[in-house]
Amino acid sequence: MGIVAVKDRLIVALDVDTREEALAIVRAVGDYCGLFKVGMQLHNSAGFGVTEAIMALGYPVFLDLKFHDIPHTVLQAAAVVSRKGVRMFTVHATGGREMLAGAVAGANQAKGATGEGPLVLAVTILTSVSQTVLNAEIGLPGTVAENVVRLAAVAQAAGVGGVVASPQEIRPLKQRFGQELVVVTPGVRPVWAAGNDQARVMTPGEAIRAGADYLVVGRPVTAARDKAGAARRIEEEMARALAAPIK
Ligand code: C5P
């Protein structure tokens, strides 16, 4: 994965409305986390300029816009964000293999001298989708876990490099794909933080020990009075988990 330090595995989600708020968080916690996630709230409010401003400060960006469209459109959108230099971006695996391959082809157009384009991440089944919703509303048979692993396999076959997965899905994905698929995990809550609306959480240490490659943390850092201190404590917990033998 080319990961060099623990802090490079901590992604802080900038779920705010303005460029000023976002850049204030970046400046506050940048010593303790390696990437920042720009999602649809900040992107649609502040535009691509905020991503460019974060990158200009020296931090890579995970652009979480979850592309889901016909393959040609996704390829073009992937090429645009890749040429602009984002480190990672997301697509919905339910768009199917050809759409996923389009995202990879778009990302590959931006491969620089190092040969590295951005990491394409597939979202499988949203964690907000329950078993009942999956089967009765969306109409997909099988359990959520079965669908997550099947869609991850489709993504991998299309050349996608990683998946966004809830804490519960880390172990089944790592058992099936090992290092072949990078696992990025939100829904992480340190014991000292509020749960907010995250239902099934793991601590940073638990998620790292389960095999997560990157953790996405939002409010425990961004809503903390001492944002830098919160990020530092999470980074330290991750480091302790990495140093301990895997159980
Ligand atoms: O504030 P919090 O730590 O809950 O933020 C988690 C971030 O990860 C948010 O940006 C949220 O959209 C994202 N996310 C998530 N659960 C998923 C996928 C993405 O919480 N299954």
Image (cartoon, rainbow, N blue to C red):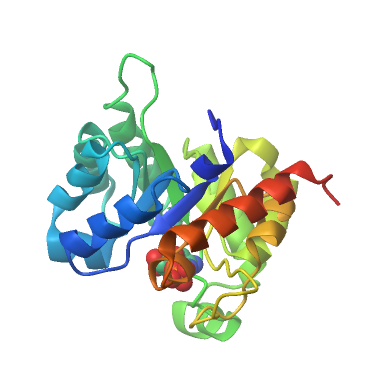
Q: Is residue 115 above or below residue 7?
A: above
Question: How far across and down, in percent of the image, does residue 162 sit?
Answer: 52, 44
Say if residue 238 shows up in the picture.
yes
Q: Which residue is drawn at the image coordinates 57% and 85% (left, top)? A: 132
The picture quadrant where one finds residue 203 is bottom right
Total numbered labels: 0
The picture quadrant where one finds residue 115 is top left
Q: Is residue 12 above or below residue 53?
A: below
Say if residue 97 shows up in the picture.
no
Question: How far across and down, in percent of the image, does residue 91 sit?
Answer: 37, 52
Q: Which residue is drawn at the image coordinates 23% and 41% (left, top)? A: 81
Q: Which residue is drawn at the image coordinates 13% and 56% (left, top)? A: 47
Question: How far across and down, in percent of the image, does residue 169 sit?
Answer: 65, 61
The picture quadrant where one finds residue 44 is bottom left
Q: Observer-nearest residue: 96 or 19? A: 19
Direction from residue 4 to residue 179 in the image, left or right: right
Q: Observer-nearest residue: 4 or 148? A: 4
Q: Observer-nearest residue: 73 or 44? A: 44
Direction from residue 120 to residue 86 in the image, left or right: left
Q: Which residue is drawn at the image coordinates 53% and 39% (left, top)? A: 157
- Locate ligand 1 by image quadrant: bottom left
Question: How far across and down, in percent of the image, does residue 189 sit?
Answer: 58, 70
